Image (tube, helix red, strand yellow):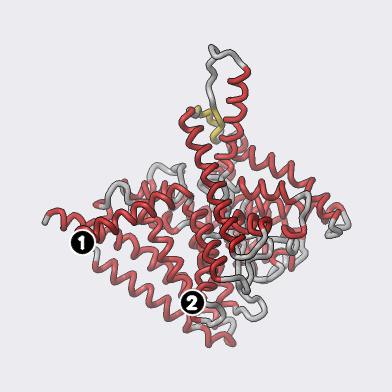
Amino acid sequence: MEKKDLNKSYYMGILKCLSYPIFMVGIVTVIPSLLFIFYPEEKGLMQYFAIPGVAYLFIGYLIRLFTQEYKVAELKRNSAPVVTLLIWIISIFIGSIPFYLTKDYTFTQALFESTSGFTTTGFTVTDFNTVSHMVLLYRSLLHLLGGVGLILILSLVVSNTFGMQLFKAEGHLDKIEPSVSYSARTIIVIYLGLITGGTILYTLFGMPLFDSINHAISAVSTGGFSTKSQSIGFWHNVPIDITTVVLMMLGATNFMGTMLLFKGKFKSLFKNSETLVTLFFIAVTTPIVIVQLFANGICEHLPSAIDNAVFQVVAVITTTGLSTVDDFFPRSTFALMPLIILMFIGGNTGSTAGGLKAYRVSLGLRSIYYETRSAAESNRIHRGRFFYHFGKKENFTREEQSANNTYILMYLAIGFVGTFALTLCGYDFKDSFIEFFSALGTVGMSSGIVSRDMSNASMWIIMVGMLIARLEIYIFILSGTRIITEIKELIKHNK
């Protein structure tokens, strides 16, 4: 009997956790319906957002009411990955319903758009010729919610040991403030502050307010959704390009790094292995892309080539996916490999960006250096292995080095499995490789596979890649394994 009560408390605790994101998705779903005030011709679309939104708010409230006597603190110690995966899956599913209700998306397309929004990938199957302002805003709000992290917001209300587990499961390894709730609150303030600042700058530089809000969210969340089929390139405006580059860089920077930047602690910010790796690869790749732009006849003048090259390079390494050049990936030849490397690297840990993360790449490069040096020197010489973390010199062990290398190998292995799966759908290897690794890095730049005409099977394959990317591999595997184990135990218990 005691075991039954314990199990009940456990499952009710999980259900209580799920009520918060359902409520948050409800708020985000209701907001677009208010646009009928500014766009009365879209009044007929209100129902597709207002009704589901209110329903989610009501369901979230009922679950919260039903589970109020149960404590999240009673959850098992290793429950964080399970809760994390369930929150993302449920949010993506209920987030897809407004898309489907508009009748502009099939069920699979609606799930695809929702997954791309929440995971801040930026792949889209939206028809820009017919899309409404309500749908455009809704897509951006999914970036907003997914970028800051559903789990991060949940950790504001779960201020205990389990909250810390959730905080780390979301990929936030640095506590900016003494407690998890303060750290989460600080990150959200920074996030919203950057979006507000970006919106103001965009508006000042000539972008309409509606587009400014959407693109500020997209850039800071490193998402990639745009209100135009030509993305940022629609405006042909250098100040807008520069603003976007700055916002993408800030979005892809560890929130701890952003804090140091705002406090003027530049030495600590730039004496950081992640920052140095990011800047190094941007500096190396940009001249190659400049030459590619001239070779393709896309740019005729150097200032234009520099502007577009910096934009494309930053968009790729920050895994944002916004663009100033149409179909640049398919048109690239010798610049394609450097861009793919940037796609692998991605942004910083504890940021809104995807990819392997610059930290792992930095650790991997340092590991190669130390192993090479160790092989060349006498075995009697023992040297420390270290990297810089915001001005601090931190040692890493061979075990950490091995774990890092294992993660990189797993990332590549999953990428090649996904690539193979897409080739089975009839696409060639090059396009399949770019498309799946773009999903796995939440980059969102397409080689041409992602479109409204793509098969359902290819959409599901890419959706899995996007979800793995947002959760990161270990969390995805641990949570999936734990859920299967829980289901088996539940079935066995009920027999």
**Residue 356 horizontal side relative to residue 69, left or right:** right
**Residue 462 horizontal side relative to residue 182, left or right:** right
Residue lying at the far left in this picture: please name it: 1
Q: Is residue 258 visible?
A: no
311 or 325, which lies in front?
325
* Mark 2: secondary structure: helix
| Residue 419 percent across, percent down from the top left | 59, 56
194 or 490, which lies in front?
490
Q: Identify residue for label 1.
A: 69
First in sequence, mark 2 or 1: give its number.
1
| Residue 307 percent across, percent down from the top left | 78, 54
Q: Identify residue for label 2.
A: 98
What's under tag 2, amino acid-wise?
A: Pro
| Residue 201 percent across, percent down from the top left | 66, 61
Q: Is residue 198 visible?
A: yes
Q: Residues within 10 Å of mark 1 (few under 14, many from 20)?
A: few
| Residue 457 percent across, percent down from the top left | 54, 67
Taking the spot 55% from the left edge, 36% from the top edge, the residue there is 390
**Residue 359 horizontal side relative to residue 399, left or right:** right
Q: Quadrant of the C terminus?
A: bottom left
What's under tag 1, amino acid-wise?
A: Glu
Taking the spot 61% from the left edge, 60% from the top edge, the residue there is 423
**In the figure, residue 328 lies in which quadrant?**
bottom right
Q: Residues within 10 Å of mark 2 (few under 14, many from 20)?
A: many
491 relative to 279, above or below = below
Taking the spot 59% from the left edge, 83% from the top edge, the residue there is 39
* Mark 1: secondary structure: loop
Closer to viewer: mark 2 or mark 1: 2
Q: Quadrant of the N terminus?
A: bottom left
